[in-house]
Image (cartoon, grey):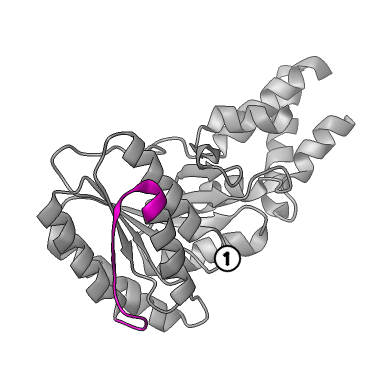
Amino acid sequence: MSKDRAKIFSSFNPLSTLERALRQKEREKCEKLELDESKVDEILKKLMSEFLLSQDSKIYLKDNKINVILIVGVNGVGKTTTIGKLALKYKKLGKKVLLGAGDTFRAAAVEQLEEWAKRAEVDIVKGREGADPASVVYDTLSRAEAIKADVVIIDTAGRLHNKANLMRELEKINNIIKKKIGEQEYESLLVIDGTTGQNGLNQAKEFNSVTDLTGFIVTKLDGTAKGGIVFSVSEELKKPIKFIGLGEKIEDLIEFNAKDFVEAIFN
């Protein structure tokens, strides 16, 4: 195996199960087609793309509806910053955006979200520190109805040390959302730090077990991260990657495209 291709495979460590599966598929495909070395990379790109769930990777906003995007994830993954970038993105598209500060357990989270609301020039609903997050979500959606908001982005607490509390909290929030918007579908997105490797996959499994995730946002893929977590969460949880974060700038949060992502790894 060439050094370049060995480096590509190294992006999956420590996700060894996924790496072995990919290596095996590549060997079988190449032996069957009796390919020479010059054609192997194209086969590898195709196989890697097949590990990525491509359907439903975009967020489609409905007109004349409140489009809810619930953001979950542990502390430190870039959750609040990602919300701010999403707010700016949709604001620039001409949408009326409202933020909900549902992480009432961390004063810093509310302050950071307020700063992003100012930068994006969007409204924000917040409660007092320690308030019931579900009540903040209720107030946020009530405010959204009053101002006819197009997009509501809701932050949530990032605690994962107590699964029972997390389950109850997210269940209440989801019930409030369903009560306010009816049968309309909404996005429930988990933010994962792209540098965390296997731990990121564990987080994804935990959150997916307590809330009905519709997809993922992977942050900090800025050159230091190897990207293996993208393949792992997509393959094992059968949920799409919606966005990836490549840096701190607003334009560094981009819609995920499986083909472009694989090409970037090779380049």
Q: Residue at x 66, y 47 (%)?
A: 228
Q: Which residue is mark 1?
A: 76
- Magenta residues? 118-131
Q: Label 1 neighbourhood size at 10 Å, few (<14), some (14-19), many (20+)?
A: few
Q: Residue at x 21, y 45 (%)?
A: 150
Give the x, y percent position of residue 119: 41, 50
Give the x, y percent position of residue 68: 26, 53
Q: Amino acid at mark 1?
A: Gly
Give the x, y percent position of residue 93: 32, 33
Q: How many marks?
A: 1
The quarter of the image holding the C terminus is top right
Q: Is residue 104 left or right of residue 238?
A: left
Q: Is residue 112 left or right of residue 62?
A: right
The quarter of the image holding the N terminus is top right
Location of residue 112 with respect to 253 vertically, above or below: below
Give the x, y percent position of residue 92: 35, 36
Location of residue 267 with respect to 253 vertically, above or below: above
Q: Where on the picture, by quarter, is residue 259?
A: top right
Q: Is residue 35 left or right of residue 197?
A: right
Residue 138 included in the magenta stretch of the image: no
Q: Residue at x 39, y 43 (%)?
A: 88
Residue 215 appears in the figure: no
Location of residue 93 with respect to 192 vertically, above or below: above
Q: Residue at x 12, y 55 (%)?
A: 145
Location of residue 255 with respect to 165 vertically, above or below: above
Residue 13 appears in the figure: yes
Residue 124 included in the magenta stretch of the image: yes
Q: Is residue 188 left or right of residue 243?
A: left
